[in-house]
Amino acid sequence: MALNDLIVSKAIIDEYHKTLIDYIDVDVAIVGGGPAGITAGYYLAKEGYKVSMYERKLSIGGGMWGGGIMFNKIVVQEEGAKILKEFNIQTKKYAENYFTADSCQTVSGLLYHATQAGLQVFNLLSVEDVKVTPDNTVCGLVINWTSVEQSGLHVDPITIGAKYIIEATGHACEIANIILKRIGKVLYTPSGSIEGEGSMNAEIAESSIEKNTREIYKNVYVAGMAANAVFGSKRMGPIFGGMMLSGKKVAQDIIKRLKEGEKSA
Ligand code: 48H
């Protein structure tokens, strides 16, 4: 059968446009498509919530593809391996409480299951600001094409609405930085500011990440590496269990809030 190039173009434009409109208002908007963001998206979407994820880059997966020093293996501990099992991702026991996994299989496995569950991914889009109510409660995101950001063109962004935001931008904790710049030292941290990431200690970093995965400002939750950076804990290197555990924890916390909201509505 003959192929018409114009129908190919029309199909892409039509379908993307419909998706963009459909996701103009969501239950949860995730900023950052690393392992923490994808995992959070999976559990939220599986529960039936409308969830979108914005990723600056072309590829989803953040810092996971490259394993450690570009050796594409990751290490997860027992609890992390249990999560990977839920995603059908293969792990290999290396020593007691140390499991390895192929980083490419892990990224693609997480993403496959998350998108199948209903997570809507928007790649090549950067979040440049948050949308707020008159009393500065965060109620959405301001997004623009990464190519606009990179080229420095003066093109205005568009806005999406969200009940909850997940800050999963990794080391840079960009959403926390935006809140500080625009709203002030209002973060739910001891100083009200970003406490800053400490040097490497996998034991401390991994054991503190779930505690640090929480609300950092009205309706904004932090997950993944950004959680330790915001709350001043340490980095953990190429052990990734904490990223998935943090993604799961943030999803569970937000699901609880959403369900409470449904009850009182
Ligand atoms: C859209 C954005 C924006 C923005 C950033 O870095 P990530 O992989 O983050 P996590 O927390 O899921 O995983 C951290 C892990 O990869 C890591 O770095 C570890 C474990 N390090 C330990 C150590 O010791 O070094 O992904 C974050 C994603 C990236 O893909 C960014 O491009 C994206 O967020 N991003 N997307 N708008 N404003 N800012």
Image (tube, rainbow, N blue to C red):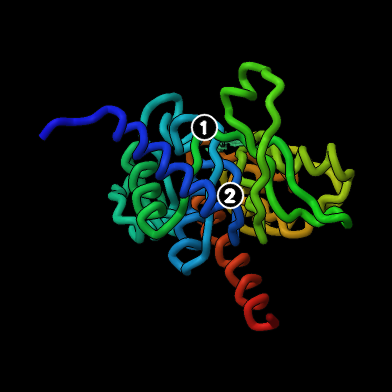
- Residue at the left extreme? 1
Q: Is residue 25 left or right of residue 11?
A: right
Give percent across and percent down for residue 232.
74, 44
Labelled disc at residue 30: 2
The answer to whether residue 197 is left or right of residue 248 is right
Tell me the number on the disc at residue 87.
Answer: none
Please tell me in which quarter of the rendered image ligand 1 is found.
top right
Image position, residue 67 (x, y; %): 42, 33
* Of residues 28 and 189, the one drawn nearer to the viewer in this rendering: 28
Which amino acid type is shown beneath numbered disc 2? Ile
Q: Local crowd at mark 1 within 10 Å, few (<14), some, or many (≥20)?
A: some
Residue depicted at x 77% and y 39%:
178
Residue 124: mark in rendering: 1
Which SS class for mark 1? loop
Q: Is residue 205 left or right of residue 117?
A: right
Judge from the rendering whether residue 218 lies leftward or rightward of residue 66; answer left or right: right
Q: Residue furthest bottom?
A: 263
Q: Can residue 36 be seen in this snapshot?
A: no
Q: Quadrant of residue 218?
A: bottom right
